[in-house]
Amino acid sequence: MRKHILAAGLLAGSVVLTLHAQPGPTDPQIAHIVVTANQVDIDAGKLAQRKSPSKDVRAFGKQMVTDHTAVNKSATDLVNKLKVKPEANATSASLRKGGDENLENLKKLKGKTFDQAYVEHEVAYHQAVIDAVDKTLLPSAKNDELKALLAKVRPALVQHLEHAQHLQAQLKQ
């Protein structure tokens, strides 16, 4: 279990480190980061819906798929409206790589071990994404509509974090 917690922490840390290791991202890069970050959580949520033995964890996975799909639709609609092409960058590549590694690790797990690893990752991931929004993405965004989208999504990220923390506490009982 410690290995899974460490992996989640390393992934979350790499999100923040990648963002801070370079100058602030441009709006097209932010758009790619947003879409990638959401897709990573959609993919993990779909896996949780299929694999978790827990009704609560499956419901959380479903919520992640629903909410993050809606955010991706809003982001895609905005970039189409602004005629901006999302630009791949080191942060989005790191997110995708970390997401793929997380899925591979989770696929090997079963039962309560799966649930604990999935939820531990969700806690670390949402905290890292909130930190990235606050410290890098919002301050770097130049377009007012992009900033508004980031600000609008932030409370949902906090709610997801709190929900994941609640599940984490339940799973430790």
Image (spheres, rainbow, N blue to C red):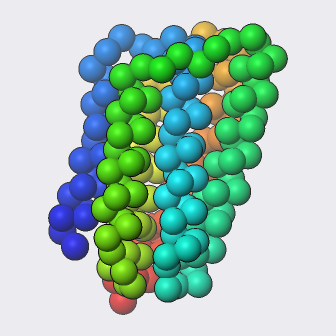
Please state the horizontal and vertical placement of residue 65, each as a whole percent of the image: 64, 57
Q: Is residue 143 visible?
A: yes
Left or right of 73: which side holds 88? left
| Quarter of image, res 83 | top right
Q: Position of residue 22 (x, y in %)?
A: 31, 15
Residue 143 located left or right of residue 128:
right
Question: How many tags in the picture?
Answer: 0
**Looking at the image, residue 79 lies above or below residue 26:** below
Up the image or down, 119 lies above or below 32; here it is below
| Quadrant placement of the C terminus | bottom left
Indicate the position of residue 88 as horizontal and vertical percent values.
48, 20
Q: Is residue 162 visible?
A: no
Q: Nearer the viewer, residue 26 or 90?
A: 90
Q: Residue furthest bottom?
A: 173
* Residue 16 against residue 99 in the figure, above or below: above
Q: Looking at the image, is 121 positioned above or below residue 172?
A: above
For the point 35% across and 33% down, the residue is 94
Q: Position of residue 41 (x, y in %)?
A: 52, 51
- Quarter of the image containing the N terminus? bottom left
Q: Residue at x 30, y 55 (%)?
A: 8
Residue at left 25%, top 64%? 4
Residue in the image at 68% along x and 12% along y: 84
